[in-house]
Structures are given as C-alpha cells and as structure tokens.
Image: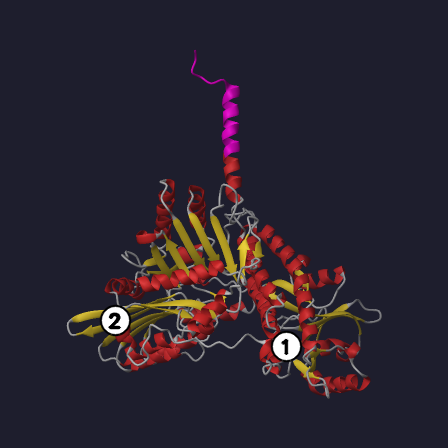
Amino acid sequence: MSDKVPDFAENEMASTVVLSEKKAKQEVTDCFENRELSWLRFNERVLEEAEDLDNPLCERLNFLSIYQSNLDEFFMVRVGSLHDQMVLNDNARENKTFMRPSEQVAAVCKKVRKLAVRNGEAYRVLMKSLNEYGIHLTDFASLEEHEAKYLEAYFKNEVLPLLSPVVVGKKTPFPFMDNKDLYAFCLLKKKGDKDRVGIVPCSLKSLNRLIQIPAHKGEYMLVEELILHFLPIVFKQYTVGEKAVIRITRNADIDADSVYDEDLDYRELMEQLIRSRKRLSPVRLEYSRPLTKKTVNRLSALLNLEASQAFLTETPLNLSFFSQFRNDLHGQTELFYEKRQPQKSPCIDENRPMLDQVAEHDMLLYYPYERMNAMIRMLEEAARDPEVESIRMTLYRVAKNSQIVAALVAASEAGKRVDVLVELKARFDEENNIHWSHLLEDAGCNVLYGLGRYKVHSKLLLITRKHGDEVQYITQIGTGNYNESTARLYTDLCFMTAKQEIGRDAEKVFKALCEETIPEGFDHLLVAPRCLQNRVLEMIENETEKAKNGETAYIGLKLNSITDKDIIRALIEASKAGVRVEMVIRGINCLRSGVPDMTENIRTVSIVGRFLEHARIYIFGVGEEEKIYISSADFMTRNTLRRVEVAAPIEEPALREKIHHIFDMQLADNVKARTQKKSGAYKKRHAEVGEEKLNSQELLFSEAYEGKL
C-alpha cells in the first residue's frame, strides 16, 4: 500500500490547517481592542462622572470640562497621527484589529457623534442645576427689552471696535484660524452676488468671556453668542444667513525624531517645532448651531476637511468659563468634594533629616494621600549636605514654581555637581521645559536634553555622598512627575532607598545618558528600552509555566494603559494556562477580559474618580517567589521599547504590604470602579445588597488622616 495520501485528502488537510489557523487568528483577534476606540471608552467613563448625580455639582462641571479638553488633545495627537498615516499609506493596518487609518478615523468619528448626544444632555442637566443656585447663561430670546438694549450698546462700544471681520472672496482668502480659538461664521447675501462667507474672531483676550447682565447677579451671556447675534451690525452691507460659532482642532502630532539633527542646537530645534505646531492642518471642525449639509460641505472644503470631520456640538465650544461658575459658588461647600489635604506619612519623623531616615530603611510615599514635601526635603538637604558630591535627576514635567528646580539650583550654587536631564519632548510642556533648562544652565547645572530618538520618561533621582572613604547612594524612583501641583491630583508612588545595589544601577542609567548611549546591563532595576519588556515577558512566562505545572500562579498589574502586543499575547497565554490575572487599568486597554477559553482568567477594572490614577505597579507570583515593582512605564510599546523608563523592585515587607493594600482596595472598589466585559465595554460596579460601599480613593484618604496608610 502506498504511503502517499491522495490529492483530495491533501487538499482537505490543507483546508483544515488553513481553517484552524484562521480560527486561531480570529480567537486572538477577539481578545484585542483598537487603541483609539479604547481611549474613547475611557473618556466615556470621564463623561459618566459628569452625569453621576452622586458627585457634587461643581465637580460634575469639572468632569465635563475635562471630557472636552481630553477630546481636544485626542484629536490633536491621535487623530492627527492617523491623518498623517492616511496620507502616507492608507493600506497599512494597525497590528491588533487590522484596521486601516481611514477605518479608524471613521470609527472614531462615529463614536464621537454618539458621545456628543450624551455630552449635550449632560450639559443641559448641569445648566438646569446651576439655575437653582442663581447662575444662568442667557440668550436674547430670554432678555427683557432694556437688557437687550444694554447689550447692543455694550457690543457697539466695547466689542465692535476690537473685531477683525473677514469677508472671504476672490481677493480675500479664507483666514488662518488658530487652534481651538472661537470664530463667528456666517453666510452673507447681497443682491446680485453669490453667497459669501463671513468670519469674525471671538477669542479676544481683552474681553471677558462671560458678560454680566445688569441687575441680575449670576446671569451671563457668552461673548461669542453676543458677537454672533450682532453679525448684521458687523456686516452692514450684507444680509446674514446661516450662522454658528465654529472652532477647529489642528494636528499637533509633531514628531521631533523625524527632524532630529545632531548638528543642530536641540533646544532651538524644539522651539522651531513648537512654532510650527500652531500651523498644522485641521483635523476637526465643530459648529454650535445646525447648518445645512450644503453649508457644512462648503465650510469643510474651505478648511480642507471632509464633511465627516465636522461635528455639531450642543455645548459651548469651550467650557473653560465653568471655572468662573465654580468660583462664584466657592462658598457652598456641598457643591464640592470634601476638602482633603495630603498627610504626613507615619513612617517619617519630621524632626530628623530625611537622608538619615532613608539610610536606615526604605520608604514609600503615596500621593496625594501623603505629602510630597518629604521627598523635596530630602533633595533640599542634599543641596546643603557637605558630604553630598553630586545630584543627578530626570525631569519630564515640573510645576510652574518648582521647589524641585529651586533645590537643584541651590545645590549647583553650593558647588555640587548637578546633572539634570530635561526632556524637551514632553508633549505640550516643551516651552515650560525649555524655560527650566535655561534657568538650570544659568545656575551652573549640567543640562542634558534627552537621548536622541528615545524620550526619557523615567522618574529617577540619585544622590551620591562621600562619607570618609565610602561612597553612598540615595536613590528615589517614582511613578509620576516631580511636580508639586499634579502630586495633589494624581495618585503616584515615590520610592526612596539607600540600597547600594539600586544606587549602582541608577548610576549606570545616568552614566549612559551623559554619554548619550542606551542604558543596559542592570542587575536590579528594569530599564527600558533594552531591559524592561524582555524581563516582564520572562516573568509572565514564569507564571505561565507554574500554572502548567499545577502550581499557584498570579499576575497583578496597575497601569494607565496597556497596548504592547507582545505583552498582551503573553498575558493571553498565561490566562489560557490558568494564571489568575488581575488588572487595574485607568485608560487605554487593548486586551479584552473574559473571552471564553482565552482571557477568562483575566479580570480588569478601571477607576475614574476624584483623583487621576497614575501609579504603575507590577506583581508577579505569590508567597516567597513574589516579585513587586513600581515604575514610570505603562505596558505600551512607546514605553517599553521607545523610551527610557525605570522600574524598581520593592523588597521591604512593610512596603510590599502597603502596595498589596492599595491594589486589593482598588480591586474591591464598588463606587468608582468599572469592570470590563468581553466586548471591551465597561460596566460600572455597584454595591450588592448587604455589601458596604467602598470608594477606594476616599477610603485611602481616610486611612491617611488616621495615620494607617
């Protein structure tokens, strides 16, 4: 009998293999979520907080404003990047859901339109609630005659002289519109002439955005609505037709790496890029009143946009005036969150030098529940300590009146060597960082500007002391920026240690940065781009092998975002092997939990509440084999492979217990937590019958006040 398989059988087997591979690919695809759509799900959770009647009124105003500003940045950066990709190669597909750039933009626009309906309804509910507290945004239909006359006079005397109207025609091109500024748009009719377009800038720095209605405290009109109403006075020679307030969002996704030239002054290059950002192409048009399809198409064409990129927005196009409403109501404490102040950590003695305390034992602070001043005090002590030889630090985003920078300046002026890496490519903080780099240089600090094509995102401080013949290291590693302002709003971990092995690894990082080489070869720290992703994959694989061998295996992750496909695939395999995986992911999450036979052992929650969850925690294993790290790095490819990031091992039992407490409490949250479903959508958790409500952020603050955190 021949061993050869008949052709029909070969074909059948080949088909089976193809179908099997296709099924496997589909199963894995079912576990992936598109990055942009996942981000929109996150912003939807922010919108939910504006809708939540359990939140104080003024905090709901704040969430609605955050929702809008988040969406602005999303279009400027992410959608802007997709538009660039469409121009370069629209056939290229992203690596998780295999969508082309144009398909992603279409899906984004569809989702944004759905959210716009909820956004408009949330705004109407909030404004109705504000009316009950004596605050009202009015329109001309609601005014009495004498009030309308007052506003007309105010417009003619105070506003009209400041306006710069433009009538678009053969000799007058469509004017340049600044990113996110407001403009009054209208169609102008004139007998015997074609309709023309009128544009009037409304973002006037010399005018208050809110115009007070006389004799009605708390009643206002938006200046752009005033201008829109009186367009017939602005364009006297025309009949005003359709009109609306409009705003455009410009692409801000400048890639500094693509124009990097080592022969150019890097700081000067960044200054040029900041200027060029202001003139990049529009990616979104918003308009405040219904316009005909023909008019939307015409306006979109003038801006070189597709009509699908134009959005009718039922809220004012800039909600920054909410801050004045909050100020008007500041005395009514029930409209705000209960006041909370960061507390002294119970592990810190404020009467002893911080350097001495850290030398004795590791410390872990948790902002904003605990004060940042302990870390700042340590840095200020180092600036004065005669035994301190050098201070090295990475700065990504700092506060406007930075105590951190002041301490570094003081150290340099005291004769110490101060090396500071100021990341000039910190998006939207470039100008601020350029300012600080000048100030630090003037004080005598050695200022570095990053590592070529790799952003330095790590939060790393190394203090080197010479005590007799002994060299001592004090190292601080954090999950968040050295920024006193955001440390009161973002939850972050600050780890301080005198472990010499950690200090030696940190010294290697700074040596590489000073030499403009990629850091590598570490024994204790995980350092991207060479020594973080691979180590994480090894630890995931280790837990996977344990599960396959019938041993207890566990992975716990607290991150802002997870998009790294290699790590996601490893987590899927871990789940399939039986590893219990628990994740607290605030924002983007490209891994769907609970998919049968694939990710059913993965549980994911997202917490959106009073404070922005920003700390990153990695937990691998249980018992004596457990490894715990805190880090500045999310599991995004940009963090794991394209940035310099640092993760530090936490070994002290008390600190490990503190991290477990934080992580477990967030997993148990049933007030601000949402649980991810297998579809990728999130469902808000609620306390079950007989179950006590647990708001992890509020409970952690209560513990900080009691000295128990």
Of helix, strand and loop, which mostly describes the magenta segment?
helix
Q: Magenta segment, which residues?
A: 1-20
**Residue indicated by mark 1:** 203
- Let me know if residue 432 appears in the view: yes
At x 69%, y 65%, the residue is 121
Residue 359, label in figure: 2
Q: Which quadrant, please, contains the N terminus?
A: top left
Q: Amino acid at mark 2?
A: Ala
Q: Secondary structure at mark 2?
A: helix
> Is 472 on the left-hand or right-hand side of 212?
left
How far, Cα to Cα, is label 1 from label 2?
A: 54 Å
Q: Secondary structure at mark 1?
A: loop
At x 81%, y 84%, the residue is 145
Where is 76 relative to 20, above or below?
A: below
Toward the front, the furthest residue is 690
First of labels 1, 2 by sequence position: 1
Residue 445 drawn at (x, y percent): 32, 76
